[in-house]
Image (cartoon, coloured by chain):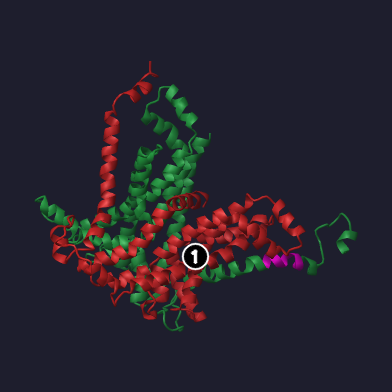
Amino acid sequence: MADTLTVVPHPRRRPAARVWRDRLPGIVMGGPAVLVFLAMFIVPMFLAFVLSLTDWNGYSLNFTFIGLDNYAEAFRNPRTVDAAIFTAVVAFFGTVLCNGVGLTIAALISGSGRANTLMRTIFFYPYIISALIIGFLWSAMLAPEGAVNGLLGHLGAPPVPFLTEVVFAKASVILTIVWSHFGFNMILFLAGIKSVPPEYYEAATVDGASKWQQFRNVTLPLIAPVFTVNLVLTLVGLLKVYDIVLALTDGGPAGSTQTIVYQILRDSFAQSELGFGAAQSVILLLVTAVLGLAVTFARRGAEQKVAD
Amino acid sequence: MRRYPTPRRRLRAPGVGTVLKWALLGAAALVMLVPLYIMVINAFKPQEAIISSPLAIGPDTFSLEYLQAALTSEKFNVVRAYGVTLLFVALVNVFGIALAAPVAYVIARGRSKWHLGLLLLFVSGLFIPGQVTLIPVVFVLRVLGLINTIPGFILFETAATLPVTIFLFAAYLRTVPRDIDEAAALDGAGKIRAFWACIFPIMRPVVATIVVLNSISVWNDFVSPQIILGPGSGIYTVTTGVYAAVGEFSTDYTTVFPTLLLAVTPAILFFVLMQRHIIGGLVAGATKG
């Protein structure tokens, strides 16, 4: 009633009770999701930082604060440093190869027709299989007595230590990841390529541009935003790679293929050093955020050029 | 001059480029399919035959006993794991959608900075890797007394689905005209009832996308069930069960291949049936996100 009488000056100001009655449905509708999300995401994120300053072992709720010791340990501990380096190698080569192969194949099968659709299915299917199972499958195939060495033996070639020698094992991890993941990048590139208006190609053809020139000067600039999404998603995803390593090499040989998440989960749960694990998690979170944002901003330049 | 080659090329037999392209694609396709083929045929062979001739299968080596052994294994009850995982998939979908849809509606219809803040809060979850929060989540669940329990696991998985779900729902709801809200309000229904009765049914396409995306991620998740449920709970999903069954015996291929085959079959069937939805959903999720 009140606000119909007090006219113009503050039309928005209403009695508190009424404001709350108007807001109630919104609170009832939004509240539960906010609560669940706070409890399982936001509070844990801050807790990760708090726990990283303690020696919590994961079982009891008793622990003491030990300052930044866990962070100092993370930079000193050779296992963590090695794991960080290998993770960086996987993230770099994985991102380059997944996107390189994904883009190449997307460009080759971007036409319509059954053969192209079939190819799309074949290249994409590993993506929907759990990474753990992909890892076990390739582990069985690349083992010293596995299928790949069996085939090489039939061809008269000596066995290759795919999983038992450091350099080979590292390459095997990266190539298995690429095998299972480039289909996802390909799908996004395909969606981007197909959204390019056909008139652009017609115009380019009239101008006498070859297929390659069309791809280079029409397609590539126009799919710049898709490229950014692909780079960021792959990079951020590979920084936390774990399942596939666990199943393929279990971090071996001699710990050479341990990734940072492998390290975090082992310290946290096998060694019961959750405080130390939390410190490494916080570092990973910061690195992920910084790299993700850096790539996004670096790519913004490339996208801007197209808009101009 | 330059314009002529294109029409002429169509009349000729396929050019060198086309042949080369399909040869390359064919070779790449073989690399993709041979592992699948090896997994399928070797699920029916004894150990010596798997090692000596991994690509061959004949009537002399074919046997169903290994698949049957894997089906009835005491270490890993596959049928039970299918049931448990499907139950988890269903529960996470129901709770995730029930929580996300109304809040996405509030966000999509709100104009204040609070609503934008709410959207940003949930979207920030897209950039937090689940593995990073897992350790403190264990802490929170321990405080709540839900560690190693199904409700604790469902709570975490549901929360993990919220960022993408809310983001896609809100984006979709922005395209739904406000007239519908007003028509629903005229019926005299409360705001909440009006949402579920009038708006939610319109969201069917985006709900389908989300169900597909969430189902794949819950079905394939390994770390969260392994850590939150833990081997001590005796509850195995398909992935944690495979890890328990194959992890120790990774050189006994008569266990490895049949177990992997059983674990993969439902995912492959789902893929074959839902391929268009899966691909469409992934593209929507990635490019809008």
Figure check: B289 above or below B195? above
Residue B255 percent across, percent down from the top left: 23, 69
Depth check: give the residue in front, A27 or A70: A27
Residue lying furthest top: B1
Residue found at x 15% / y 53%: A151
Report crowding for label 1: few under 14, some 14 to 19, many 20 or more residues within 10 A (C-alpha).
Answer: many
Number of callouts: 1
Question: Chain B in the picture: what colour?
Answer: red
Residue found at x 41% / y 30%: A214
Whether residue A224 appears in this view of the structure is yes
Q: Amino acid at mark 1?
A: Ala
Residue B192 percent across, percent down from the top left: 68, 65
Depth check: give the residue in front, B240 or A235: B240
Quadrant assignment, res B223: bottom left
Q: Which residues are magenta?
A: A20-27
Q: Is residue B9 left or right of residue A17?
A: left
Figure check: B28 above or below B145? above
Report the magenta stretch's main SS. Answer: helix
Pointer 1 residue: B160
Residue found at x 22% / y 69%: B65
Residue lying furthest left: A156
At mark 1, the secondary structure is helix
